[in-house]
Image (tube, rainbow, N blue to C red):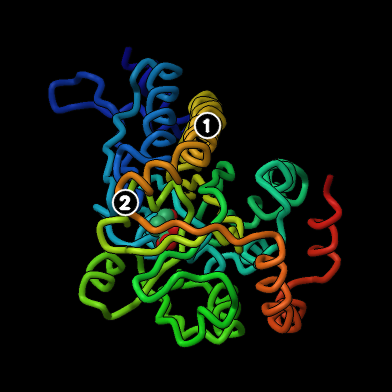
Amino acid sequence: MSKLISACMLAGSTALILTAGGALAQAEVKIGYALAPNSHYGAAAEKWDEVVTAETDGAFDFKHFPSSGLGGEREVIEGLQIGTIEATIVSSGTLANFVPETGVFDLPFLFRDLDHARDVLDGPIGDEILARFDDVGLHAMAWGEQGFRHITNNRNPISTPEDVEGLKIRTMENPVHLKAFNTLGAAPTPMAWPEVISSLQQGVIDGQENPLSVIVSAKLDEVQKYLTLSGHVYSPAMLLVSKSFWEGLSDEDKAAFEKGATEAVAAMRGFVDDVETSGVETLKERGMDVGELSTEEKAKFQQAVQGAYESYYQMYDKDLIDRIIATE
Ligand code: PAF
């Protein structure tokens, strides 16, 4: 056994750790995420844990910190960079602050539907962007997803761009989203997720925007009256690990984490597919006033954010944007 342990340690595996009594201990994987266990993030984290545990005979002990238990998404990602947190599942909210190219997926009305988004993220463009995280102390395992974002608020129903004028809307800490809502004439405030519910309760902001997966699981109906199915932007997510953690894993353990991440994404997308079907009914039953933009109304919003594209073309390569649009 001691030879096995030495060999594993020489090979750089972090999975085998000796307790004081000489028994093998599990390596801890702290995994933080913003939403409750019964969310698409919870579904993915559980699946990741389950597969790694099965593939490594329990060499890793996942400690889950749901509901922003380790802080906001930016803080958690910084924790991964310095090696105090091993893993996370996050939205694209603050990712562009670490790898700017990530923000290209946040452009409003870029993706036609979920299939289009999944094809781009699972293809060469998605892979190119995942690979860049290794340069910033992180290792990106896979793209997950949240679905298309919709607007909720307490001020008024929304069917035209004029209806969002002056609306105090929380956006993620994301320059692309901020630009879009400024262009629409709203009064956007970037804010970390853990502050959102209390800010809505206190009336500091009128509204926010998130996919049905979040609106349902975070029970935003308790603090928001109107839901407008605007689908104004696709919301990707990402499974990330700390680069120092990743580099300490053996090849077998890396394969287990990769397999787990692939299955976690499937679980997450399955959850999103379900909530896209059932979410509107659930929110109506919980008392929300739900409206959906017609194709013509959506086209007016699309037209109204066109001005923002001039700055997006300065931030992102137009060829990249065209490649995304051209993906079948
Ligand atoms: O709005 C956000 O910040 C994100 O969509 C959330 C809810 C934290 C999930 O990653």
Please say whether residue 254 is visible from this viewpoint.
no
Q: For this rendering, which residue is in front, 59 or 181?
A: 181
Q: Pointer 2: what residue?
A: 218
Residue drawn at 25 percent across, 21 percent down: 24
Mark 2: C-beta under 8 Å from nearest atom of ligand 1: yes
Number of disc labels: 2
Residue 295 as seen in the image, left or right of residue 220? right
Disc 2 element: loop
Residue drawn at 63 percent across, 51 percent down: 130
Q: Pointer 1: what residue?
A: 270
Find the distance from the CA under tag 2 to the CA under tag 1.
18 Å
Question: Which amino acid lies under the numbered mark 2 shown in the image of this protein?
Answer: Ala
Q: Is the residue 234 above or below the residue 277 in the image? A: below
Asked whether the residues under the numbered discs 2 and 1 touch, taking CB atoms below 8 Å apart as contact, a structural biologist would say no
Outermost residue, left side: 21
Q: Quadrant of the N terminus?
A: top left
Residue 289 as seen in the image, left or right of residue 327? left
Q: Quadrant of residue 68?
A: bottom left
Residue 270 as seen in the image, left or right of residue 167? right
Question: Which amino acid lies under the numbered mark 1 shown in the image of this protein?
Answer: Gly
Q: Quadrant of residue 198?
A: bottom left
Q: For this rendering, which residue is in front, 321 or 167?
A: 167
Q: Compare marks 2 and 1 and give the one earlier in the sequence.
A: 2
Assess disc 1: are there few (<14), some (14-19) or many (≥20) residues with their C-alpha within 10 Å of its C-alpha: some
Residue 321 in the image, given as x and y percentages of width and height = 79, 64
Residue drawn at 62 percent across, 64 percent down: 106
Residue drawn at 50 percent across, 59 percent down: 291
Residue 184 in the image, given as x and y percentages of width and height = 59, 82
Q: Is the residue 309 above or below the residue 127 in the image? A: below
